[in-house]
Every structure is written in C-alpha cells, then in structure tokens.
Image (cartoon, grey):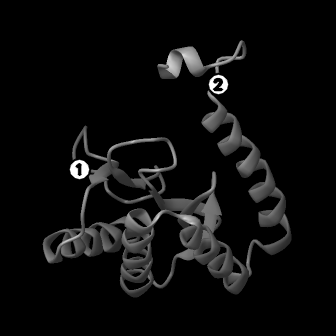
Amino acid sequence: MSQREKKGTDGFTAEEKAAMKERAKELKAEARANKNREEGEHDVLAKIAEMPDFDRVMAERIHEIIKASAPILSPRTWYGMPAYARDGKIVCFFQSAHKFGSRYATLGFNDSANLDDGSMWPTSFALKELTAAEEERITALVQRAVS
C-alpha cells in the first residue's frame, strides 16, 4: 500500500498523525520545562532508547557529538525526535529511519541554524552510517549552526 493510499480523508498518514499528537504533548511539556535541561536530556534519551538498534546507536552517537560540539544547545524532543534548541528554537534534530519508514536516518537543521551559504544550502543530511568522516562533518556543521 502506498503512502497516498494510507492517507485518510484528512490527507495525513497514520505516522504523520502520530507525529502531530506527539508534538502537541511536547508543546505542553515545553511550557512546563522550557528551561530545564535535565528534563529535556531525559526525554531525548528516552526517545533514543525506544529506537530500533541501528537507529539507536546512531542517535546515541549524534547526541554525544552535539553535546560536545555545541554545549549551548538544550536537548529536547520535537515531533517525537531528539532535537537541540537554542533560546527556545530548534536548531537541529535527528530523525530515525524507522520513524517514517525511510531507508536512511536524517540529521536536519532548522532556519535558526547559521548554515547560510549564498542563495542555496543544504539543511538536512541522509545518514546510513557514522564513520569518523561523518562524525567530523557533523561536528563542524553543528558548530557552524550555533556560531
């Protein structure tokens, strides 16, 4: 069954509806704990722990890289994904391959990330594995995003 066939009359797939419900819960939690890093860290680690092994290992390593390379960012969940915010705005996030049945995980950056490069630049990156080269690139991207 295709994604189009899975969509209901409102145009959203079951996965999209679940992500929106998750986001509504997160907004309520953010209102209570917007400045509480420990709670955000706990929520992110809990989401990572729920992931299938392949995604979980990658998400754990990315979490470590982001914490080390941009300690100014606060971990929190965003649409059920590990995310990292500055001044209340999401700068970057990790989307597991499993979340939407994709063949790769995604490291994404929102418009609050300082990645501008001329008139066009990438804001998300497909990840199939993490080698030292990818880890180095992620470190540089995250550092640039918060510069």
Which residue is more in the foreground, 65 or 109?
65
Q: Amino acid at mark 1?
A: Asp
**From mark 1 to mark 2, how far is it between C-alphas?**
33 Å
**Residue 91 numbered tag:** none
Check the image and report above or below for 62 versus 126.
below
Q: Residue furthest front?
A: 1
Mark whose residue sits in front, 1 or 2: 2
Q: Which mark is residue 12?
A: 2
Q: Are marks 1 and 2 in contact (CB under 8 Å)?
A: no
Q: Is residue 29 left or right of residue 83?
A: right
| Secondary structure type for disc 1 | loop
Q: Amino acid at mark 2?
A: Phe
Left or right, 44 with reference to 131: right
- Which one is in front, 119 or 27? 27
Specify whether residue 86 is in view. no
Q: Position of residue 43 (x, y in %)?
A: 67, 73
Q: Residue at x 43, y 68 (%)?
A: 53
**Residue at image location 48% in from the left, 56% down from the top:** 112
Q: Is residue 72 above or below residue 7?
A: below
Q: What residue is rendered at 41% in x and 83% in y?
A: 64
Q: Is residue 123 left or right of residue 51?
A: left
- Which of the image's four quarters has the C terminus? bottom left
Label 1 neighbour load within 10 Å: few <14, some 14-19, many 20+: few
Q: Which residue is mark 1?
A: 117
